[in-house]
Amino acid sequence: MSRLSVRGLTKHYGGIAALSGAGFEIDAPGIYGLIGPNGAGKTTLFDILSGSVPPDRGQVLLDGRDVTGFAAHRMARLGMARTFQECRILPEETCLENVLFAAQQKGMRATLVQLASRSQAARRAKQDEAMRLLALVRLEAYAHAPAEALSFGQRRLLEIVSTFIGVPDVLLLDEPASGVNPALLVTLSEFIRTMYAERPRVFMVVEHNMEFIMSLAGDIIVMHQGAVLERGTPEAVQASRLVIEAYLG
Amino acid sequence: MARIAPWLALLVLLTALYAMPHFAAGQPYVLHLLILSMLYAIPAVGLNLMLGYVGLVSLGHMAFAGFGAYVAAVLMVDVKIGFWSALALATLASGAAGAAIGVVCLRFRSHFFMIVTLAFGLMLYSVMNNWDSVTRGAAGFAGIPRPAPIAIGGESFPFGPLDHFYLLVLSAAVLVFALQRLVVHSDFGRILAAIRQDERLARARGVNALLYKTAVFALGSAIAGFGGVLQVSFLRVAAPASFSLAESINMVLIVIVGGAGTLSGPALGALLFVGLPEYLRAAQEWRLVVFGVLLVAITLFAPRGLAGVAAGLWRRISSRRAQAAS
Amino acid sequence: MDALLEQIINGLMMGSIYVLVALGMVLIYGVMQVVNFAHGVLFTVGGYLAYFFYTRLFPSYPLAVLLSMGSLGIIGFALERGVFRPLAGNLRNQVIASLGLILAIENLVVAIWGPNALQFRVSATDVLVPVGELRFSVQHLAIIGITLAMVAALGVFLKYTRFGTAIRATSQSREAAMVVGIPVERVHWSSFAIGTALAALGGALIGPLFLVFPQMGDAPLVKGLAAILLGGMGSVPGAVAGGMILGVVESVSTLFLPTDYRDSIAFVVMVAILLVRPQGLFGRRMRGED
């Protein structure tokens, strides 16, 4: 059974077709790259997969289950985590708080129980893991600093690190390398590889930084004008004439 | 030492407040002012949870206080239920009304949310003012009783006397502020804070934002209703004017000036609102002019309100002390 | 039949006042994306200043109205520069600041002129004009006439003058307007000033008919809000249509609903429109806010 199945996704904004019949199947865990020129529909695809927007037409199946049109919070609870192109973190909270929040139970019943019992057990249980993750991206020194004090690259790392603590099954990383300086890129790349090695699952990474994605991903999906153009190994895709024309034309 | 200090200060404050009837014997005026301040502070806590911690600017908050007040009035006077049951039922009813109206209002964002809360507030006010058969209309609903005396250690403790009612309101206020702290420093509070800081992110991390916003709207309305019942029991009359748009605006002012999103903000704002004119000994209108200007100034220059200014001063003093010590 | 005609004309008159308020609000909203909740108190000040100029300065009603409009224009300019511009981008704080203004200004009016209603006697209210079997004061009809003239003037200004076009451009896209070289800051304060001047006109026109009192702007604010919601938040023709429709519906409703609930019509309209057709009659779909 395929892990993630995308079929015929179509989405219009105003008169513009952001997606026209985009589709692919992902059968096995792995790091998948999603590339394509601007306007190819990559972020729209992510928005639909993560539940931020519903598609006009098409289907999304997660482990065989139809999750088309599910709201963002439901997708999150089904094990789908994402980061944002513009990098979103909780600016007023500390780095540690940011990570712990991602781990926190969000269901109303569990929350009300915690309110009444004032139990800190769940938080304490996650504390060590949170600190370990922060250390993996060299942010442990900032654990108690407010997130807005971080540089943009560091915030990116914080955002990505936060997605891992919830132990998601499918991770959507939207341009994780953009705005990150080359030194931190190495840390980022290593971090993603380490996390994958710890627990192989489906990682999808939208990227413009070709060097970064080609060395990280094993399978590249190329989008163009709202649909999937080509798919293959990094070498095959880079050599493909179709892909080259799409970028140049 | 630093962690104990705030708790010690709080203990001293509470002791002083509970002992106030003794200190202020012969000056009922002081107790009267404190009661008024607390009757403003209680609904302000409800609004603080909505506005300060989640960012929902409701312009109809006092209408829920009025809803609770009138429900209790009808229960006590027409249905002849006792005060305590009426208080509980009215609080629940206000919460339910908040949930129902919240479901409608929360479909909208920013401006539109404010306008819909404004509209609902005006509608409720119109009902209070015009549904004469139930609410007694613009003239007000008179004859609301104080709570029946309770038995304490074999003695009867009536609530007619001012200092006895003061202790009741004080205990209610302590309860409400304790509840506020409980909510804020919990997983629930963290979710509220996340919604305020970045709702889209919160949703992506699994938060059903609409559900939580409705829940806090209901909670805030319930607290408002709770305060409303105490208010009309104190005054022994329920008047629509106490729950008008102007009062809802005053409530926003109290929360903002006191410090939105802080635990002590509602208390500071309410104290200032009630206490300042007495201090200035100025006419009612001038007090509100000053408040209006103060609100504008705070929005422009000190968005964290009085509590924020106080916290800032405290930080500067303690860092200067640390510097002097080193 | 006469009763209906009477209410329709009354409705057009009140509708005209609503239109004046709504026009100011829609202009400010269109350009600055801010709902100016303080519009009601500015309406009130307009009424009081007209009264002040008429009774203290010179007994010419038209002059008093013009002076009031001018004064409010200046006040609007000051408010935009001093309060709204520094808070630009932070909607919540702009609304809260306008609440502060409401408190300050409404109570300032009470502090200066007292809490009681004042009579603003003007000859136009005493002279009656026959319309069929009915009689209306000149003021009633003048309000309708002046408002229509204002709407026409504003329409011409927005459509055919350079600055008017600049205003329309800015309300569509601030960034694009800046790129094209439109003086966006000037557009902001002049829109605000025009808006407040229109509010003043409303207050100055209604004063002689219904007395001048500190809360006189409260209902017009709500009616103005309902009107722009009904017409569509960014739409000038919408504001005109919304105001007139609301005015007429309210007046005609008194023929079969208890007058106590007349004001509630506006509230119901507001909620109903938001639930059924949030962009109003003529509005554009709002940009998403996330």
Image (spheres, coloured by chain):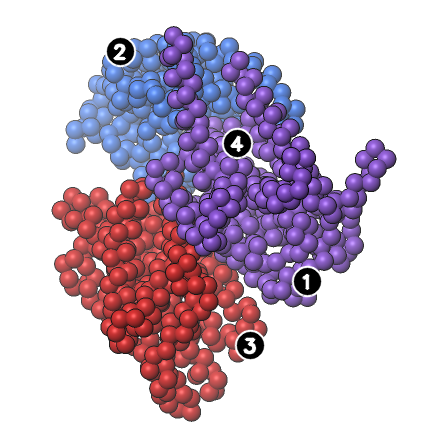
Chain colours: A blue, B purple, C red
- Report the residue at 51% width, 16% height from top: B2
Q: Position of residue C80 (x, y in %)?
A: 28, 50
Find numbered disc 2 in the image and state the secondary structure of the residue it sits on: helix
Q: Chain of mark 3?
A: C
Amino acid at dot 3: Phe
Q: Chain of mark 1?
A: B
Between label 4 and label 2, give the one nearer the viewer.
4
Q: Which mark is residue A145?
A: none
Residue found at the far bottom of this picture: C133
Between label 3 and label 1, give the one nearer the viewer.
1
Q: Mark 2 = which residue?
A: A183
In this rendering, would B120 be left or right of C100? right
Q: Position of residue B244 (x, y in %)?
A: 53, 56
In this rendering, would B175 be left or right of B198? right
Find numbered disc 1 in the image and state the secondary structure of the residue it sits on: helix
Q: Mark 3 = which residue?
A: C256
Q: Mark 1 = which residue?
A: B134
- Report the residue at 31% width, 34% height from top: A41
Look at the numbered discs 1 and 2 and tell me whether their residues touch, using CB distance below 8 Å.
Answer: no
Look at the numbered discs 4 and 2 and tell me whether their residues touch, using CB distance below 8 Å.
Answer: no
Q: Mark 4 = which residue?
A: B263
Where C227 falls versus C254 (above or below)? above
